């Protein structure tokens, strides 16, 4: 692959399409949850830690539309529906495991960096706010004469 400007990620680039499909937090979580086998909607909600039923439904539909997840409805009473990875979806198991391992190994470092950056921004913003309030109080103490 060429990394010359304008050649790495064109609008119709397969890599860009793949990133668009799986870049959502819930897509990755859902795909990872399904690596162990088919699951019901409620099981996915429980395993996904915080996803709403509505967002999970939207995520599953998007993954189905892209051929990564399949929906199996069983003719039973009560009705049972399970979701599983398609053959194409299974090709993402290794990349997802790799990203998960990276997150486990480096997640703490990312959080530490993020907290330091937020603290630096707060200190910078606090400094600006302090200077602004000093200037404002100085103006109030010395009203201009008209």
Image (cartoon, helix red, strand yellow):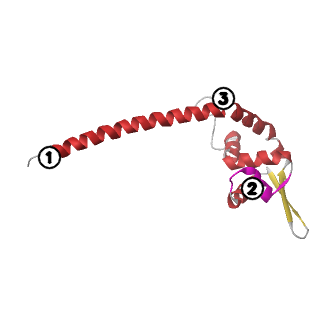
Q: Nearer the viewer, residue 123 or 33?
A: 123
Which residue position is annotated with label 3? Answer: 2
Whether residue 55 is in magenta: the answer is no
Is residue 47 rendered magenta in the image? yes
Circle 3 residues within 10 Å: few <14, some 14–19, many ≥20:
few
Residue named by callout 1: 143
Mark 2 → mark 3, Cα distance in angstroms: 41 Å
Residue at image point 78% right, 37% down: 97
Find the residue positioned furthest to the right: 76
Quarter-of-image position of residue 51: bottom right
Residue that numbered label 2 is attached to: 45
Q: CA distance from mark 1 to mark 3?
A: 64 Å
Q: Which residues are magenta?
A: 38-51
- Marks 1 and 3: which is nearer the front? 1
**Left or right for 91, reference 140:** right
Residue 59 in sight here: yes
**Residue beneath the point at 85% across and 46% down:** 36
Q: Secondary structure at mark 1?
A: loop
> In which quadrant of the rendered image does the N terminus lie?
top right
Secondary structure under the numbered disc 3 in the rendered image: loop
């Amino acid at each position: 692959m060429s990394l010359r400007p304008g050649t790495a990620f064109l609008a119709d680039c397969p890599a860009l399409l793949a990133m668009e499909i799986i870049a959502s937090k819930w897509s990755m979580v859902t795909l990872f949850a399904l690596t162990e086998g088919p699951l019901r909607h409620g099981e996915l909600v429980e395993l996904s830690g915080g996803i709403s039923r509505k967002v999970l439904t939207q995520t599953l539909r998007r993954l189905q539309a892209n051929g990564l997840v399949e929906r199996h409805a069983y003719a039973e009473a009560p009705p049972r529906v399970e979701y599983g990875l398609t053959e194409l979806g299974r090709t993402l198991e290794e990349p997802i495991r790799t990203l998960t391992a990276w997150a486990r190994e480096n997640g703490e470092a990312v959080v530490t960096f993020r907290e330091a950056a937020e603290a630096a921004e707060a200190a910078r913003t606090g400094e600006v706010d302090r200077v602004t309030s000093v200037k404002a109080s100085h103006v109030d103490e010395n009203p201009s004469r008209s």
